[in-house]
Each structure stands twice: as structure tokens, then as C-alpha cells.
Image (spheres, grey):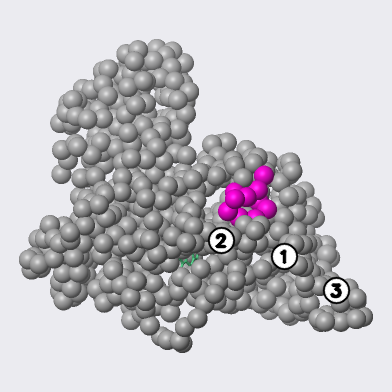
Amino acid sequence: MSDKRKVNGNSKNEQLEAYRVDDHGKHMTTNQGLKVSEDEFSLKAGDRGPTLMEDFHFREKMTHFDHERIPERIVHARGYAAHGEFELYESMKEYTKAKFLQKPGSKTPVFVRFSTVAGSKGSGELARDVRGFATKFYTEEGNYDLVGNNIPVFFIQDAVKFPDLIHAVKPEPHNGIPQAASAHDTFWDFVANNQESAHMIMWHLSDRAIPRSFRMMEGFGVHTFRFVNEEGKAHFVKFHWKPKLGIHSVVWDEAQKINGKDPDFHRGDLYNSIENGDFPEYELGVQVIPEEDEFTFDFDILDPTKIWPEEDVPVKIVGKMTLNRNVDNVFAETEQVAFHPGHVVPGIDFTNDPLLQGRLFSYTDTQLIRLGGPNFHELPINRPVCPFHNNQRDGYGRHTINRGQVSYHKNSLAQNTPEPASPAEGGYEHYQEKVEGRKVKTRSESFKDHFSQATLFWNSMSNPEKEHIITAFCFELGKVQNKDIQQQVVDMFAKVNLDMAVQIANGIGVTAPTEGGSDITKVSPALSQENSIKSAATRKIAVLLDEDYDSKVVGNVMQQFKKQGMQPEIVAPKQGKLKTDKGPELEADHTFLTADSVLFDAVYLVGGAAQDKTFKEKAGYFVKEAFSHFKPIGATQDGEELLNNLDIPTLAAGVITEGDSDDFVVRFTEAVKQHRFWDRDVD
Ligand code: HDD
């Protein structure tokens, strides 16, 4: 268990300690501190009489309850968070004066919230959706927020269209359907009529939108930001988070089933990993472009629908973030945390990306309604770890007791303090970019190519990834009622790749386009998940067991799985100890009723001499489903028999037999590292 009270030099944790309260073993009191003597019965006039207004404890308890919800986030309502730290590998002094990026080895406390975008607070976590990846760095110069997503581009180029995008994707207003899904008419109508979304849609329909875990997805700052160094020299910069476990996804059928079997799958995975000490790690990477190279690319580097291909602008890894502490209280921390892309520190600045510029307005505005006033920065999770002083006063929920007579600038009564700091003293100085132009409501010509990078993305996918994209299109458009919209979307995506669009058209029964295609042949291997890190660490293995098994072999294999960092859990027909006379009895972690193949990464099919009809049926269903989701399957001799009965070819890719042999664990671990075996023949 992670001990939250061990503050061990983490300045944010030290600060939070002052706010923590443990009610255990204490008497109950009212909020005024008065001890309460009765909490079962309200105060009544007579045994069977009416409740009296005088019962202040009842009134306080009920009033607090009646008010305990706050508005959910307008987007990214469903989220989960954890604390951690960021450690710098090498100094970024050449590019930025940001203090937390100067000294190799220096550590900065962080708080990260992951989220889905479209669904409500209680929605299933495996929706096909973008994942939010928001990081708050509590630096000694103030809070720096990197409010990113797991996809490096965005649907739109100008923030003024954000309300339209979100209205289109949220449940349709006339019937409130569907929840947490983009597979409906208004979303696809928006896409067809706002073709700047093409590139983002390719990502949205790829495996990126159904991650296996928050721990196995990338994060991106999306926008082009600006680094400014001590000499005032600026560079354009894009931020990346690279997960140490690689980038991995589930398959769509699995995602939909997980939403029913365990709608908390992603948060549970994050919470349990941290409690188990398997701390999620992500490396921070930056792509840097000198200012003088601003116009040397065949796209506009300020356009948020464009990536900077990693092969053209390498990602320099500069540090590592480790999430090592769960929150104490989800509402106080995860729900009340307030991110803002405008929370910057000296050395990090904005660019004129029109999407970023609009975000700079929206975030404070939303916190005002969500958190009820302008003092949300005083909430423990939002407080910087450095002191803050200014002349802002009062407002709902003010905690700070500002002393003194003066709350204005300039003044003489307080020797003109608090006074602004010069840049040399750490005062934030906006980068003095020279700008001139007419006031126009227009889009730059340089933002008008919406398709080249969509094709680049398509070209970079492996064949299975391409198939998944086509199936995702067929699912999403298949749910669209309006034939015109279906046709418009297919025609639009013919501009990305004609063959892809034809396959989609055939899948959903609209006219196959004959024109389109692209002359872009470029490929960016970094875009394919197939090329990412492969690891068996923390993978969950279902060990299917019935009675009369060889406990020594199974126990030993499970131990070796653990040594490889995997997490074996026994699934059996019933709970409790499982009988055998071949060694110590093992205990089931789950039954076939409480567990399901979609909640595991791989299966080790053991069975046992006592395998009865029920076991064969239940285990058979479990294994067949895992096989159809392309998962590794290991089998002992008993298990192999069952595979044969199920018509699962024991020679199929990723089926590892001879589960009692010496090199089984090595072969099985290799298979788990592969994550999935796409070249299996499954319908
Ligand atoms: Fe946003 C929340 C990420 C565009 C307006 N956004 C929010 C969160 C993330 C992002 C991760 C959740 C933060 C949390 O966990 O509390 N948003 C992005 C990215 C964008 C983006 C990567 C494009 C590059 N967002 C965007 C635009 C606007 C907003 C263009 C409006 C102009 N976003 C909001 C918001 C939210 C929000 C309404 C809702 C809750 C919140 O801010 O705190 O202000």
C-alpha cells in the first residue's frame, strides 16, 4: 500500500498533509464542533409525531447532502487522477529558463488527471474517445499545467468552433442519446461539414481511442508552445509523454464488453497499479524547432491539426514522470483539480495557434461555474507550493486571511508592495513577438490542407491497424441513421485513401466513391503502435483451474509469471480452496461468474483431471473469447485437450502449448509481450 503520509520531500504532499483529516476513532460532531449524541433518529414531537425544525443536526446533515454535487466538467467529466513526481534527465537550459527544467536529477511534484471527453461523470471508461492527459507540475515558480490528450492533433483549428464540436458529439438534445459515443448523426454531420477534422478522425477511429490502460498510452501537449531561454531566445516546442510500458489497445468488441463488465476498468487499473507498487512511468519528450525555421515545413507549424513527424523533428527525451501515490479523496482532489493551459512559468510561452488562444479564455471561465467562484486556487489540490501574493480579495469561499490595510497597487502605505518582480527576479515576461495585421475573422491559407497528414497517418498503419480503422468507420457510420451523412463522410474520406473509402462504402451500403485518393506516399513509423515498446510487465493472466490439478506445476508456473512481472489470478468454477492431492491447494481469486476474459491480457488454461461439463463450458467460452480477441493462450496437456474440443488450433499464432514443459514460461512471456496476435483467423 502506498503510504500517503510519508511526505518524504515531496513539497505538494507536505502541503496536503496539513489538510488531511482522519475521522477514525473520533466522536461525531456537527460542523460547529458540537458533539452529536444521536444520529439514528430525527427529533420528533412524540414517538410517532412530526420532525421538528429545531433539530439542527438533522438540518445540517441534510443541507450538506443536498448540496454535495457540483456541475460536472462540460467535457472530460469522467476522469481519474494520481500524484507523482517528475525527474529531469538533462538540463533544458539551452532552450528554456523554466526552473524545473534546469538541473538534472531535480524532482517536481505532479498531479495527473486522465479522462474521456464526451461521456458524463458516470459513463463507461472504454468508450471510443480521446483520452485527456492533464499534468499539473507544482514548481517553485508556480503551477505549470500541461493540459494534453493522448492524440497529438485536434478536431478543429479555431476555438470558436469548440462549442459546436462538443454539441455535435454529446448526446443529441432532443432525446439525450447516445451516452459517451460518437457513433451518431450529429457528430458525423459535424465531421462531414468541418473537414479540418479529417486527420483527427483517423486517430479517433484508430486503436488509440480504446487504450488498454492509462499506463499504456501517449500524451501530447498538442499545440505548439514556445520555450524561451535566459537570453530571451525562443524556440517552438511540442510536448510528448511516452509510456514506459509502450502503447497498447484493446479491440472494439472487448471495449464494449468491458464497459458492461467493469465500467471502472481504467481507473481500477491505475489505482491498483499504484497500490501494488507498479508505478506508471512516462518519459517527457520535446520536439524543438528554432524560430527561424518556422516556415520551412510543408504545413503550418501552428496548425493544431498537424503533427511534426518524429522522423523529421526527433523527440528528445528529457525526463521521466512517475505516478506513485493515489489520492486520499476523489472529490477533494480529482474532482476539484482545476487545470488551465494558461498556467505557465517563466521560460514557457504561447504561440498564435488559434485553438490555444481560445483555450486561454475557456478554462478559468469553466472553473468559475464548476467550483463556484474565483477562489478555487486556494483549494488544497490547486494551491501552488510557492507562496502567492497579490491584491485580489474576497469572493465565495475565501480561505486566505490577508492582513493589512492595503489591497491595491500602487500604494505608499505598504511601501508599494506586493510589487511586481522584474524578469531577473523571476517575474513572468510575455515573449515580445512582433505581430501586426488587420483585424480579420478568417483562416490562414496555410491552415487549409486538411488531408495530407490524414493520409500520412493511414500510410503509417500496419495492416491490422488499417482493418481496425475500417471496422471502426463501419461501426460509427453504421449507427448513423441519415444516408446523406453516411455518403458525405465516405466521400470526404475518399480524399484520404480511395481504397479505404470504398471498403467503408461497401460495409455500410452507400455508393462507393470513384474519385479521390491522395498522392501522399510518406510514412511515419512512429505513428504505428506496432512499433512501440513491448513488455509483459503488469499484464494480467487468467489461470483457469478446476479440481485435481498438479498444484506443484501450476504454483511454480504462477511464481515464474510473477517473476516476469505478470499478474496471474486464478479463475475457477467456485470460490475458495480448490481440491487436489497433488500438492498444496490453491485458492481461486475469481469465479467464471465474477471474472471475464475481457478483463485479462492472456489465459493460462490448466484445467485439472476433474474437469467436468460445467468447467468445460465456462472455460471454453472464456478461452474462445480470448482467442477471438487475439490474446496469448497457454495450455497444459489437459488444457490442450479442451482447445482441441473447441476447435482452437494449437498451432495458431500466440497459442503456447506444453504448459508443463521447462521453457513454457519463457515462450509464454514472449507471447504476452507481443500483446495480440493479429494474424489469427477469427471471424
Ligand atoms: Fe479542453 C478540459 C484537453 C481544447 C475547453 N481539456 C480539458 C481537459 C483536458 C483538455 C485534458 C480535462 C482537464 C481535467 O482533467 O480537469 N482541450 C484539451 C486539449 C485540447 C482542448 C488537448 C486541444 C488541443 N478545450 C479545448 C478547447 C476549449 C476547451 C478548444 C475551449 C475553447 N477543456 C475546456 C474546458 C474544460 C476542458 C471547457 C472542461 C473542464 C475544464 O476545462 O476544466 O474549459
Residue 160, position in %: x, y?
A: 43, 79
Range shown magenta? 92-103
Whether the magenta-drawn stretch holds residue 181 is answered as no
Q: Earlier in the sequence, mark 2 or mark 3?
A: 2
Q: Which mark is residue 234?
A: 2
Relative height, residue 40 to residue 66 (above, below): above
Q: Hey, what amino acid is under mark 3?
A: Thr
* Residue 382 seen: yes
Secondary-structure class at tag 2: strand
Q: Is residue 648 left or right of residue 31?
A: left
Relative height, residue 376 to residue 347 (above, below): below
Q: Hey, what amino acid is under mark 1?
A: Pro
Quarter of the view holding residue 546: top left
Residue at (41% x, 85% y) in the render = 441
Labels 3 and 1 touching (C-beta < 8 A): no
Residue at (71% x, 52% y) in the render = 12
Q: Earlier in the sequence, mark 2 or mark 1?
A: 2
Residue at (74% x, 41% y) in the render = 8
The response on whether ligand 1 sits within 8 Å of label 3 is no
Marks 2/3: CA–CA distance: 31 Å
Q: Is residue 157 left or right of residue 402?
A: left
206 vs 446, nearest the viewer: 446
Marks 2/1: CA–CA distance: 15 Å
Q: Quadrant of the C terminus?
A: top left
* Residue 270 seen: no
Secondary-structure class at tag 3: loop
Tell us which disc is closer to us: 3 or 1.
1
Residue at numbered disc 1: 423
Q: Residues within 10 Å of mark 3 (few under 14, many from 20)?
A: some
Dominant SS type (magenta): loop
